[in-house]
Image (spheres, helix red, strand yellow):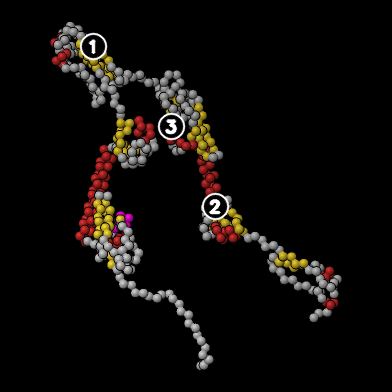
Amino acid sequence: MASPSTVAATLSCSSSSWLHGFAGPTNEISKFPDKRIPMQVLAQKKAKKTRKIILKEDVIDLGKRGQLVDVKAGYYRNFLLPTGKAQIVTPGLFKEMQMEEERIEAEKKRVKEEAQQLALIFETVGAFKVKRKGGKGRQIFGTVTAQDLVDIIKAQIQRDVDKRIVSLPEIRETGEYIAELKLHPEVTAQLRLNEHWIMQDQIQDRLVGKRKLVTCLDSGEHKSPTDKTRETKRTAGVFACRKMASPSTVAATLSCSSSSWLHCFAGPTNEISKFPDKRIPMLVLAQKKAKKTRKIILKEDVIDLGKRGQLVDVKAGYYRNFLLPTGKAQIVTPGLFKEMQMEEERIEAEKKRVKEEAQQLALIFETVGAFKVKRKGGKGRQIFGTVTAQDLVDIIKAQIQRDVDKRIVSLPEIRETGEYIAELKLHPEVTAQLRLNEHWIMQDQIQDRLVGKCKLVTCLDSGGV
């Protein structure tokens, strides 16, 4: 025991990094040698621990994949780490991420510089030219699309441009227009389209599908064969034939050029010969141009047209303007048609082979007869459990070494011994039936066994050795 004079002369306070003792200056303590000394111990509050992590995938209310975030240690330990959504940022990983960020920034800078160079090329080249057929005045046929501009750029400066970045106003006549190309989020190039870019072409008017009445006149003079003249005029599919000959041979023959879709008719020659000295009316008929169709094969399903791989006939315009640009169909060429025929023959042969195998398997089932399986039974005809499709599949595999899908097996509910019929849908056109009788489901005797019971043994002290 220390004397009162030295009480509280010293005060030793153990402390950690988060706990500190404070008792005031020692000279203040010495003022109270014989009294109680007030001492206040302050505990520093434990700081919240956080972890700097990188997200492996998007996390709602936290960040995107690849983002660096600070989270509580418990949240990372209990949720992000077990689910594999994040990873602790180690010094090595942090260095790799910095290098990857630098590489990405360099790539972005390179892409932007290329876009700026391409924009400078467009400004240097000036206007691009394309021919368009035009009508009266400044009107042009059709319009100018983004794909047209892309094709022109490719042809003239050998640069590939995505048509989705092209913004064009509607162009229906010659004039001055501005097209914009969004080469980069920060770089937009403008192309000036003027009257030199859209040019009108002269179009020859053609007469199509009309009828003409040609009158053959007899001049009454006899001319030699060398004086015979023949003039054939073609006006977009209509042929007119005029022939001047001697009275004896007037209209004896009529030569008309024709194609596979255009025919001329002037009546029988014996009827014409009855009128040697008269005007012979001859009507030249132009057969109406048939609608052109194309036999195509569909590359994918098309609503109201057909399924993938189907052969259909469509209008040429529908194929040219919709099916071909979208890649939904392909023209059936002789070579492709031959390949398709060979493929169809192969498929038919495969179907035939599968059907024959199913018929052979059904014959095996009929030959083998009933299959046997052991089941433990209770009183009378009752069995424990039931017989499932998988049981039948296993028996077939064990006895005849054939694999059968349990999904093609149809079984009634079997709860007792008796006679049952099972069906196997081996093929859409082949169904096999198996007879299941009392010899197939057999009852076994079950020995009662005592398992898992515990006995309480009491050890009594007899008091002797």
Q: Residues within 10 Å of mark 3 (few under 14, many from 20)?
A: few
Residue 144 vertical placement versus 31 (above, below):
above
Q: Earlier in the sequence, mark 1 or mark 3?
A: 3
C-alpha span from label 3 to label 2: 44 Å
Q: What is the secondary structure assignment of the residue under circle 2?
A: loop
Label 2 amino acid? Answer: Val
Q: Nearer the viewer, mark 1 or mark 2?
A: 2
Please tell me which residue lies in front, 448 or 372: 448
Mark number for residue 59? Answer: 2
Q: Earlier in the sequence, mark 3 or mark 2?
A: 2
Question: Which image quarter holds the N terminus?
Answer: bottom right
Label 3 amino acid? Answer: Asp
User: In x, y percent, where is residue 150?
Assistant: 44, 34
User: In x, y percent, where is residue 322?
Assistant: 38, 34
Badges 3 and 2: C-beta atoms under 8 Å apart? no
Q: Residues within 10 Å of mark 1 (few under 14, many from 20)?
A: some
Residue for point 60% across, 60% down: 73
Magenta range is: 404-409
C-alpha span from label 1 to label 2: 88 Å
**Does the magenta segment cover residue 451?**
no
Q: Which residue is mark 3?
A: 148
Residue for point 52% across, 53% down: 57
Residue for point 69% across, 68% down: 16
Q: Which residue is mark 1?
A: 215
Q: What is the secondary structure assignment of the residue under circle 1?
A: strand
Q: How many marks?
A: 3
Q: Residues within 10 Å of mark 2 (few under 14, many from 20)?
A: few
Q: Nearer the viewer, mark 3 or mark 2?
A: 2
Residue for point 17% across, 12% down: 250
Label 1 amino acid? Answer: Thr
User: In x, y percent, where is residue 141?
Assistant: 41, 24
On the question of residue 405 being in view, the answer is: no
